[in-house]
Image: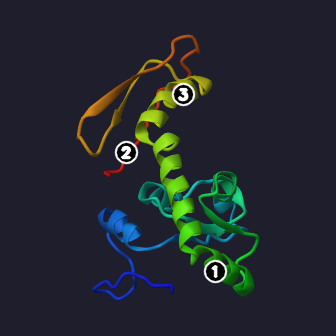
């Protein structure tokens, strides 16, 4: 059964702060971006991380970063095309409690292991250094309101001053 949250406006859109609650209410998360859109191929959408954080399997296409992650780690179902027969087959698989629970457990474990703030925070200095950014950076943590210092590697020449912001979602 496909449902959307009931909102006062009747359009199914909810405020961002309510997304974790609503994601947790459903059995799976659908991420159906148009595969012809380059943005869908070269990005990892918020829906991926919302599903991982909630421990919910994701139904998506086989294209792009999100399709690769879901296929590699078994965190849901990735279909070649968004056609009625393929979506029906995917929903049938997700309707099996054991399959859905196992995919959800893998999603949650992957989120906690690879896509959590502590893991990403350790990788940021290396990533910044590969871009030629050195020095000290502060990343604002929305949950605590505190700035978390990240010591940048020294060695790479300073190319330009940039300001980056990474926000950790509550939960």
Q: Return the mark for residue 150.
A: none
Q: Nearer the viewer, residue 8 or 22?
A: 22
Q: Is residue 31 left or right of residue 149?
A: right
Q: Residue furthest top?
A: 155
Disc 2, SS: loop
Position in image of residue 164 (x %, y %):
43, 37
Q: Earlier in the sequence, mark 3 or mark 1?
A: 1
| Mark 3: few/some/many CA within 10 Å (<14, 14-19, 20+) | some
Query: 137 or 163, which lies in front?
Result: 137
What is the x, y in percent for residue 137? 40, 26
- Residue named by callout 2: 167
Q: Which mark is residue 92?
A: 1
Give me the C-alpha separation between circle 1 and circle 2. 36 Å
Q: Earlier in the sequence, mark 2 or mark 3?
A: 3
Q: Residue at x 70, y 78 (%)?
A: 82
Give me the residue at 50% from left, 62% from top.
47
> Looking at the picture, how far across and down is residue 117, in whole percent?
42, 39
Location of residue 17 (image quadrant): bottom left
Q: Which residue appears at 44% of the width and 32% of the height?
A: 121
Q: Nearer the viewer, residue 144 or 77?
A: 77
- The one nearer the camera, 58 or 81, is 58
Q: Residue lying farthest left? A: 145
Q: Nearer the viewer, mark 1 or mark 2?
A: 1
Q: Is residue 53 above or below residue 22?
A: above
The alpha-carbon separation of the residues under discs 2 and 3 comes to 17 Å
Q: How many marks?
A: 3
Mark 3 vs mark 1, CA separation in Å = 43 Å
Q: Which residue matches tag 3? A: 128
């Amino acid at each position: 059964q496909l449902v959307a949250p009931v909102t006062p406006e009747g359009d199914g859109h909810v405020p961002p702060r309510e997304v974790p609650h609503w994601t947790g209410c459903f059995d799976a998360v659908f991420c159906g971006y148009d595969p012809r859109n380059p943005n869908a191929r070269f990005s990892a959408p918020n829906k991926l991380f919302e599903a991982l954080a909630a421990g919910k399997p994701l139904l998506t296409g086989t294209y792009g970063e999100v399709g690769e992650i879901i296929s590699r780690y078994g965190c849901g179902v990735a279909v070649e095309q968004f056609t009625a027969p393929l979506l029906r087959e995917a929903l049938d698989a997700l309707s099996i409690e054991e399959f859905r629970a196992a995919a959800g457990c893998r999603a949650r474990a992957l989120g906690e292991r690879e896509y959590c703030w502590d893991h990403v925070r350790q990788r940021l200095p290396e990533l910044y250094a590969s871009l030629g950014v050195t020095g000290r950076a502060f990343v604002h943590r929305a949950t605590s309101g505190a700035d978390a210092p990240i010591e940048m590697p020294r060695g790479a020449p300073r190319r330009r001053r940039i300001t980056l912001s990474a926000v950790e979602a509550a939960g």
